Structure formats: structure tokens, C-alpha cells
Image (cartoon, helix red, strand yellow):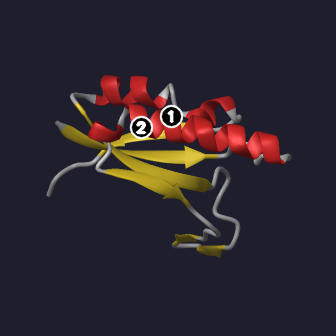
Amino acid sequence: MAKFLYGYHGGKMPETEAEEQASIAAWVAWVTKYEASMPDPGNPVGQSKTVSASGISDDGGANPLSGYAIIEAANIDEATAIANECPIIGEGGSVEVAQIMEM
């Protein structure tokens, strides 16, 4: 099995306690469904900065990372199909899927 990095971008923050509980339940259900394929179910991330030859940007870029996970799948199509079920999609966010290349 190949390993893939999920980079989560965006997503709406819950505005009420009920929305927060529904979001947590959706994430727990999704991670539980795929836990055998998730060696690292990931975490949200905080403040980010972008470092480039032109300097350091304090805003994390145009589409800052909001979290990550690592998943094992047969190929990028399978990894993408699993990502398509990720709760962040329903929260207005997106999932970037990239294969981790072993060195």
C-alpha cells in the first residue's frame, strides 16, 4: 500500500454548540470507518507562515493549510475516493491528496 498525505484547506468553523457536536461526530465516524488505513489520522493546524526566496509571509499563503492526515491506499484514485467522503468537504473546505514518495 502507498501512503498519501491529505492536506486540508479551509472549512467553516462551527457557529453553535450543536454544529460543533455534529462536526465532531462526522469526523469521528469518518476516521473510524477508515482507521485501518490511517496510520496518522492527523490534526488541525494553527498559525502558518510561508517561506520563499522573496521572504516570509505571515498569512500562510492564498489557501492556508487547516489540517492534515496520512492514509494508506492502493493508489491515488482510492485515496481520492476516501478523501471525497471527508467531512471537511461538507464544511466548505477541500482536501489536497499527494502521494508520499519513499526515499
**Residue 94 visible in the picture:** no
Q: Residue at x 27, y 48 (%)?
A: 100
In this rendering, position of residue 3 left or right of residue 33: left
Q: Is residue 42 above or below residue 25?
A: below
Residue 29, label in figure: 1
* Circle 2 crowding by C-alpha within 10 Å: few under 14, some 14–19, many from 20: few
Amino acid residing under circle 2: Thr
At which x and y percent is residue 84?
Answer: 50, 25
Q: Residue at x 52, y 41 (%)?
A: 28
| Mark number, residue 101 | none
| Image coords of residue 10 (percent x, y) | 67, 46
> Which quadrant, please, contains the N terminus?
top left
Q: Amino acid at mark 1?
A: Ala
Q: CA distance from mark 1 to mark 2?
A: 5 Å
* Residue bearing mark 2: 32
Q: Is residue 36 above or below residue 90?
A: below
User: Picture quarter containing residue 78?
Assistant: top left
Crowding at dot 1, Cα within 10 Å, few <14 / some 14-19 / many 20+, comes out as: some
Q: How many marks?
A: 2
Q: Quick check: marks 1 and 2 in contact, CB under 8 Å?
A: yes
